[in-house]
Image (cartoon, rainbow, N blue to C red):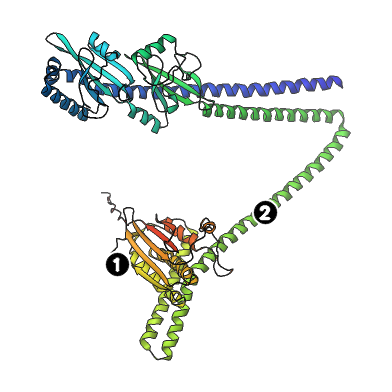
Amino acid sequence: MRGEIQRHFWLALLAVFAIAGVALGFWWLTYVRQMGGLERQVEDRLTLNVRAVESEIERFRYLPGVIGQDGRVVDMLQHPEALAGMAETNAYLQAVREMSGADEIYVLNLSGETLAASNWNEPGSFVGHNYAFRPYFENAMASGSGRFYAVGVTTGKPGYFLSSRVDAGGRPVGVVVAKVDMAPLASAWAAAGEMSAIADENGIVFLSGDPGWMYRPLQALPGDTVQLLKVQRRYDGIDIAGAAPLTPAADAGAASLILNAGERHLLGRRTVEPDGWQVLSALSLEPMEREARLIGGLAASVAVLALGALVFFNQRRQIVRLKLDQNAVLERRVAERTQALAHEVEERRRAEMELRATQENLIHAAKLAALGRMSAAIVHEVSQPLSALDNTLAAADLHAQREARDEVHRNLGNARNLLRRMQRTVKHLRTFSSRRDPGPPEAVNVAGVIEAALDIVAPQARNDAVHVQADVAPDLPLVAGNAVRLEQVFINLLLNAIEATASAGHNQVQIAAQLGEAGLTVEVGDTGPGIPEGVRERLFEPFFTTKSTGESLGLGLSITRTLLEEFGGSLRFEPRIGGGTIVSVALPLYQAQPARKVVEAV
């Protein structure tokens, strides 16, 4: 018995190691494959970024040399005492800056002092400043040209300085410098969400799409490099030595580094000559590691299932062997097992039937809920013209008693119009409740819509002794929407305004329309008690109402906002000066769609 237990223990331990090995193997294969793909992505991004950096530099490489060939620049350097020549050179440099797109252009004499600059008449002008300490001046004087990236000591703005020596009569007379602003390249990286940057030959990041990388060394800087940066004033005013390195160890190839609160990234580097810059690009390892873990977990699950199947078939083999050895005992066990399986099948069948019945009940309940919401909306929208219809028929009855046939005819016509309006309302509400897309917007005359809405709410306004004043020009531009649905919007808003005004004991509701840059705005202002702060937050909740039970379904504002949003409109509530509320309805202007050309097949 003890030996059997030990055998099972070792088999279980072996199975655990096998499952772990399978999971680890698949995890490793996935990791390696994904890492290769990630490295290719980093390399592709590096290639694009290197091309972008080289293109940005090449745009201005020629500029200092070309400017140095201009006679005005040469004459000014030979005769710096001539004020007219200096003014002419300043104007020339300013014009070249505007046409070329360079950040700044300036001319230095042999001692490194700026004689003329494109910003000669602007704050932070370079004129009069000495830049002999800058390497771009020293290199230009020594070899004819220079290149240097640094933070400007005068403006405090970083830039890439391209310099060219000016010769006259076989001897040098000065240096022309063009400062290039490379910040748009970093802005493009930031807008694209790329973790890309450029580091100088010392490994200091000076341009990056991630602000957290700026002016940080890739590795800790040696003391002589820090001293050289101070002498050159390359990053004047920035504590480079105190910045934390981006990568923990020096590595010329791709390396993992810790960024953004511990998240690991794959960093790629590419050297750009002749400056010795390093173009950097990084991609997060989290998606790759997550997929590798997922594949490893799935492999472990499959291994568990396979092991379970193996155990199952092994048990079946043991059962068969026991059947051969102990036929009588096996028959009894088979019978018991069969009975248990039959009971289990029956239980599963009954559970399946109960589940199906529950699903049917849920589907039926969902249908009832949708029907209830639709019915509530129809009742809410039809109740208003029904009230107007009742008042119209009552008026027709009074006119009939007085034998005023014209008035009776007019009132009956209005009643038929209200019936047709209710039919259209029901039709549109059914479309609204069953379909989100109301179709393409139509050209709607807001003045006509408001006039139709006023006809419906007029009886209610008279009963509440409220005067509705409309200041809506009939020649307003057409808006995009649906006439019937916009009538529903203004009917709801006008009724709310009338009831609020009547409850406060006032008698004035105003409607105004004005044209703005974004479209047409219609304002409905009442002189009611206003909207409390606690109620304002729940205005658009379905079935929320502050009225007594049965007076309102609480759907008006919710449906109103939904109708407006279908056509790109909006609804806003603001307190009215002097008391009350102003409801602003913003509607987009109608823009006719161009007719499509139909090409017939020949």
Residue drawn 43% across the image and 55% down it: 565
Q: Residue furthest right?
A: 328
User: Which amino acid, mark 2?
Assistant: Thr
Q: Is residue 420 visible?
A: no
Mark 1 closeness class: few <14, some 14–19, many ≥20 residues within 10 Å: few
Please say if 12 is above or below 567.
Answer: above
Q: Where is residue 113 in the image (x, y as percent from the top left)?
A: 22, 16
Residue placed under numbered mark 2 in the picture: 358
Residue placed under numbered mark 1 in the picture: 474
Q: Residue 268 lies in what quarter of the image?
A: top left
Residue drawn 37% across the image and 61% down it: 522
Q: Can residue 571 be seen in this view?
A: yes
**Horizontal side of residue 312 vs 82, given as left or right:** right
| Element type at mark 1 | loop
**Horizontal side of residue 15 vs 556, given as left or right:** right
Please say if 404 is above or below 536.
Answer: below
Q: Where is residue 175 in the image (x, y as percent from the top left)?
A: 21, 15
Q: Where is residue 476 in the image (x, y as percent from the top left)?
A: 29, 63
Q: Which of pointers 1 and 2 indicates the residue nearer the eye?
A: 1
Residue drawn 43% across the image and 57% down it: 572
